[in-house]
Image (spheres, rainbow, N blue to C red):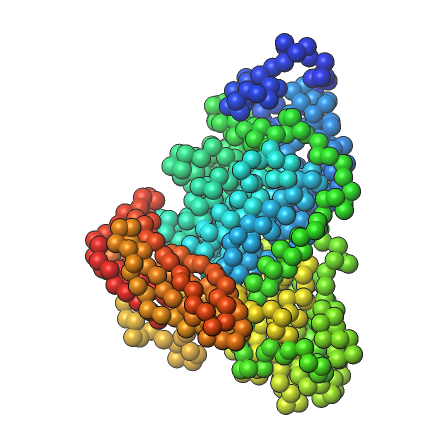
C-alpha cells in the first residue's frame, strides 16, 4: 500500500474576502486566465500531484487492481465501483476543502457502452450505421455518469481492428477508418455536448492512441509495426475526427510502434497531437503504461520511464505513480524542465475548469431513480440494439410471425443475462436485463417456448444434448442461442480462433438431425468463424452483446416486429486462417492469383453486408451537380414491409503515387424506405477530403486523374 506524504496546509477558501478572491476562483474570468493564475500559485509538488491518477478498486476486466489508501490530493481518481454521488462527494470534500488551493479531483470511469442503462458494445453500434442514435445513447451515459459524480469517461475507443482474435475489437467501431471517424465524432458529441460544465455532460477520452489494434496474432499489449503512411491513412483518421469534434482528452496506448512505446513517443504525443493538430486537451496514459516502459525495454527504471513519458508530452500518469515518485527529482536534476511540467498541468487544469468543477465540485445528491434509466432511455438503447443486429442468413424461415407455434429455445445463451452485456459492462442491474428466454416468452407466449440449455459455452459436457434434441422434436422451429462469454472479448480477451467451441458447434449438428428449421442467434464480441455452422441453419441473426435490452431485439427480429437493418462494420472471414481480412486492403500485384488452396479466399460475410425483410433495388448512380460534385442514387423498397436501408458510398483511385485500397468508404446514410416507395440518397464530394489521400506526414493532397464512385455493383467514373 502506498502512502502519499505531502504535507497539506489547511486553508479555508470560503473565508476569503470578496476583493481577495484569486482570479482562478472567479467564474467570470476566462479559463486561460484562471489556469495561468492557479498555475502561478502552485508549488512544483502541487503541480506534480495533478499529473497523477490512481485507481480505487479493481477495474471491470479485473486486469487492474488499484490502491484505495492514498490521500485524495491527486489530479484524478478512477472509481470502478462508485455509482452514488455521496461516495464521490466525501472524497471530493477533502480535496476541495482541506487542501491549500482546493483543486477538485477529476473522477473517471470506463463507461464504455453505458453507465447503468447499458447499450450494445461499440462494434455493434457501428453496425447500426446510425450515428445519431449512438450520440443519443452516449448522452444518456453522460447524464448517468455525471450525476453519479463522474465527469470523465475513457471512451470512445477508436482503434481500427482487423484481427478478430484481438478481444478489444469489441470496444471499437470495426475495420474501417471512415466508419470509426464518424462514430467517434458522434460519441464525443453525445458525451460532451456543447458545454462540459453542463451537469449532464462528461469529458470523453479517445483511445488507445495509437495503433493498438494492429496487434500481431491478436495478442494484447504486444508491439506493433506500422509504417508512417499506414499510421496516417488508416489509424489516424478517427483520432483526427475526435479532435475536430472537440474531444477533451486522449489516452496513449500500451503498444510500441516500430520500437517506440506510444506512451513515450514525442512525435505522436507532442508533434502530432499538440503541435500539428494544435489541440489543447489532455493526454493520459493507459493503466500502468509509464511503468511498463521498463518491461518494454524502453527505460532502465521507473525514473527513466517517467522522464521519457513526460518529455514525450504525456500529461497524466494513470495508476503507477511513476510521476509522483520521480518527477520532482527529475526536475531537480534538470532532466525534465518545469516548462514541460507546466504545459501538462495547464492542460489538466484547463479540463477541470471547463468541466466547471471549481464552481460545482459536488454533484447533487439524488436517488438512483432520478439518475438512471429515465423515461425514454430504454427506447433509445432498445432501438440501438435492434438496429445493431445483423441478419446474416435467411432462407425465408424468418420472420416467424406471431402465430402460435412451438419454439425450441436451445443453447447456453438462451437463459443467461450477464453474458449479453459484454465487456466493460458498466453498472447494470441484473433485474433490468431481459434474457432471450424472457423476451421470447413475453413475445410468443411462455406456453410456446420449450427451453433446454443443451450445453455450456465451452467444455466437454454433452449430457444436455438429449434433452435439447427431445425439445426440438416437439417443436415447429428451433431457435439456437450460441455465442461467447463476455470475458472472451474486451481487454486481454484473446482467442486463437474465431470459431465457437466444439461443444456448441456439435449441439447444432445434433439439432440439425431433427429436421426442424433452425434459426441461429449469436451473441459475441468479435466476428466469428461460421463456415461449419452456416450450412446447418436456415437463418442467422448476429445480435452482438446488446446490453440491457438483452433478448428483446432478438425476439423482435425473429417475430418480424422488427425489420433488421444492421450491416457489418467488420468482415466475417470464412475461417480464422484468412485473418487479417478487411475490405479496404491495398491493391495486390497479381489480383488474379494468390488465393488459398484449401479454403475460399473471399470472406463469408463482407464489410457492409446485412439482410432485411424488405428487398431493395438500386438504380444507377447519377451525377446531379458539377461544382460541388453531387451524386445521387435511388433505392426502391420492392418488399412488402417498410425497411431501413444504409447506402455506402465508396471511392476508388485506380492509379496513384502511393497505392490505395480497391475501395474506400467515404460516406454513408441510413433512411427508412416505406414498402413500395423509392428514396434518394446523395453524396456531395469535397475533392480533397473524399478523393484525396494523406502523405506520411499527415498532409492531404489530391492527384489528377480518374476516380470511381461506387455503390454496391454500380459505378461511375469521373476525372479530376
Ligand atoms: C485499459 C483502458 C482503460 C484503463 C482504465 C486499461 O487497462 O486498457 O482501456 O481505460 O484500463 O480502466
Quadrant of residue 501 within the rendered picture: bottom right
Residue in front for this viewpoint, 395 or 498: 395
Residue in front for this viewpoint, 561 or 284: 561
Position of residue 85 measured from the top left corner of the image (x, y, whole percent): 74, 38
Q: Going by the image, does 436 lie left or right of 164?
A: right
Q: Report the quarter where the N terminus lies.
A: top right
Position of residue 464 measured from the top left corner of the image (x, y, whole percent): 74, 80
Quadrant of residue 318 within the rendered picture: top right
Position of residue 572 measured from the top left corner of the image (x, y, whole percent): 49, 69
Whether residue 173 is visible, yes or no, is yes
What number of labels is visible? Answer: 0
Position of residue 220 measured from the top left corner of the image (x, y, whole percent): 54, 55
**Residue sitting farthest toward the front:** 677
**At x 27% / y 67%, what residue is drawn?**
589
Whether residue 513 is visible, yes or no, is no
User: Against 413, is 299 above or below?
Assistant: above
Residue in front for this viewpoint, 500 or 364: 364
Q: Going by the image, does 610 lie left or right of 560?
A: left
User: Against 216, is 54 above or below?
Assistant: above
**At x 58% / y 28%, what residue is drawn?**
353
Q: Report the quarter where the C terminus lies.
A: bottom left
User: Against 411, is 15 above or below?
Assistant: above
**At x 70% / y 49%, what residue is drawn?**
374
**At x 68% / y 29%, what residue is drawn?**
361
Q: Going by the image, does 276 lie left or right of 704?
A: right
Amino acid at each position: 500500500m502506498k502512502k502519499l506524504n505531502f504535507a497539506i496546509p489547511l486553508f479555508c477558501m470560503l473565508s476569503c474576502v470578496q476583493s481577495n478572491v484569486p482570479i482562478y476562483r472567479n467564474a467570470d474570468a476566462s479559463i486561460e486566465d484562471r489556469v495561468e493564475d492557479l498555475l502561478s500559485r502552485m508549488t512544483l509538488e502541487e503541480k506534480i500531484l495533478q499529473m497523477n491518477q490512481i485507481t480505487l478498486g479493481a477495474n471491470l476486466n479485473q486486469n487492474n487492481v488499484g490502491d484505495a489508501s492514498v490521500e485524495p490530493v491527486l489530479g484524478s481518481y478512477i472509481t470502478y465501483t462508485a455509482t452514488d454521488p455521496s461516495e464521490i462527494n466525501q472524497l471530493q470534500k477533502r480535496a476541495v476543502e482541506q487542501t491549500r488551493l482546493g483543486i477538485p479531483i477529476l473522477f473517471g470511469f470506463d463507461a464504455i457502452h453505458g453507465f447503468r442503462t447499458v447499450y450494445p458494445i461499440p462494434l455493434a453500434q457501428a453496425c447500426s450505421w446510425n450515428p445519431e442514435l449512438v450520440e443519443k445513447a452516449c448522452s444518456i451515459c453522460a447524464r448517468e455518469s455525471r450525476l453519479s459524480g463522474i465527469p470523465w469517461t475513457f471512451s470512445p475507443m477508436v482503434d481500427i481492428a482487423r484481427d478478430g482474435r484481438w478481444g478489444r475489437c469489441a470496444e471499437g467501431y470495426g475495420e474501417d477508418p471512415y466508419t470509426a471517424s464518424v462514430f467517434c465524432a458522434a460519441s464525443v458529441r453525445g458525451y460532451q455536448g456543447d458545454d462540459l460544465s453542463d451537469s449532464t455532460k462528461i469529458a470523453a477520452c479517445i483511445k488507445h492512441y495509437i495503433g493498438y489494434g494492429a496487434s500481431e496474432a491478436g495478442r494484447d499489449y504486444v508491439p506493433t509495426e506500422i509504417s508512417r503512411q499506414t499510421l496516417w491513412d488508416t489509424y489516424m483518421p478517427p483520432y483526427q475526427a475526435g479532435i475536430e469534434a472537440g474531444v477533451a482528452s486522449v489516452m496513449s496506448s500500451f503498444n510500441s510502434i516500430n520500437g517506440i512505446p506510444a506512451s513515450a513517443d514525442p512525435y505522436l504525443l507532442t508533434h502530432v497531437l499538440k503541435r500539428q493538430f494544435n489541440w489543447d486537451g489532455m493526454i493520459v496514459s493507459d493503466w500502468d503504461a509509464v511503468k511498463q516502459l521498463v518491461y518494454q525495454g524502453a527505460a532502465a527504471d521507473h525514473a527513466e520511464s517517467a522522464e521519457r513519458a513526460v518529455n514525450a508530452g504525456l500529461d497524466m500518469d494513470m495508476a503507477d505513480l511513476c510521476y509522483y515518485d520521480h518527477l520532482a527529482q527529475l526536475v531537480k536534476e534538470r532532466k525534465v524542465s518545469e516548462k514541460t511540467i507546466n504545459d501538462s498541468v495547464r492542460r489538466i487544469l484547463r479540463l477541470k475548469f471547463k468541466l466547471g468543477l471549481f464552481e460545482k465540485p459536488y454533484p447533487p445528491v439524488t436517488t438512483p431513480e432520478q439518475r438512471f434509466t429515465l423515461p425514454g432511455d430504454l427506447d433509445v438503447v432498445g432501438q440501438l440494439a435492434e438496429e445493431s443486429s445483423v441478419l446474416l442468413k435467411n432462407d425465408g424461415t424468418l420472420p416467424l410471425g406471431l402465430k402460435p407455434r412451438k419454439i425450441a429455445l436451445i443453447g447456453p445463451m438462451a437463459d443467461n443475462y450477464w453474458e449479453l452485456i459484454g465487456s466493460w459492462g458498466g453498472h447494470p442491474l441484473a433485474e433490468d436485463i431481459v434474457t432471450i428466454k424472457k423476451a421470447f416468452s413475453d413475445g410468443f407466449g411462455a406456453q410456446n417456448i420449450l427451453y433446454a440449455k443443451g450445453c455450456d459455452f465451452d467444455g466437454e459436457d454433452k449430457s444436455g444434448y438429449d434433452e435439447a434434441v427431445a425439445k426440438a422434436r416437439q417443436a415447429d422451429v428451433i431457435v439456437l442461442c450460441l455465442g461467447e462469454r463476455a470475458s472472451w472479448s474486451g481487454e486481454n480477451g484473446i482467442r486463437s480462433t474465431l470459431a465457437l467451441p466444439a461443444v456448441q458447434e456439435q449441439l447444432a449438428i445434433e439439432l440439425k438431425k431433427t429436421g426442424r428449421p433452425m434459426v441461429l442467434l449469436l451473441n459475441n464480441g468479435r466476428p466469428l468463424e461460421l463456415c461449419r455452422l452456416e450450412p446447418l441453419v436456415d437463418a442467422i441473426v448476429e445480435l452482438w452483446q446488446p446490453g440491457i435490452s438483452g433478448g428483446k431485439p432478438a425476439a423482435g427480429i425473429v417475430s418480424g416486429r422488427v425489420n433488421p437493418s444492421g450491416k457489418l462494420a467488420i468482415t466475417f472471414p470464412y475461417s480464422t486462417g484468412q485473418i487479417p481480412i478487411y475490405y479496404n486492403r491495398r491493391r495486390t500485384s497479381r489480383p488474379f492469383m494468390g488465393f488459398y488452396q484449401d479454403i475460399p479466399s473471399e470472406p463469408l460475410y463482407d464489410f457492409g453486408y446485412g439482410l432485411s425483410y424488405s428487398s431493395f433495388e438500386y438504380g444507377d448512380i447519377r451525377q446531379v451537380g458539377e461544382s460541388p460534385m453531387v451524386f445521387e442514387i435511388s433505392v426502391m423498397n420492392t418488399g412488402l414491409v417498410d425497411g431501413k436501408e444504409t447506402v455506402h458510398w465508396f471511392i476508388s483511385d485506380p492509379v496513384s503515387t502511393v497505392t490505395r485500397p480497391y475501395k474506400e468508404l467515404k460516406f454513408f446514410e441510413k433512411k427508412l424506405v416505406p414498402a413500395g416507395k423509392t428514396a434518394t440518397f446523395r453524396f456531395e464530394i469535397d475533392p480533397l477530403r473524399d478523393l484525396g489521400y494523406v502523405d506520411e506526414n499527415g498532409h492531404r493532397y489530391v492527384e489528377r486523374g480518374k476516380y470511381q464512385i461506387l455503390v454496391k455493383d454500380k459505378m461511375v467514373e469521373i476525372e479530376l
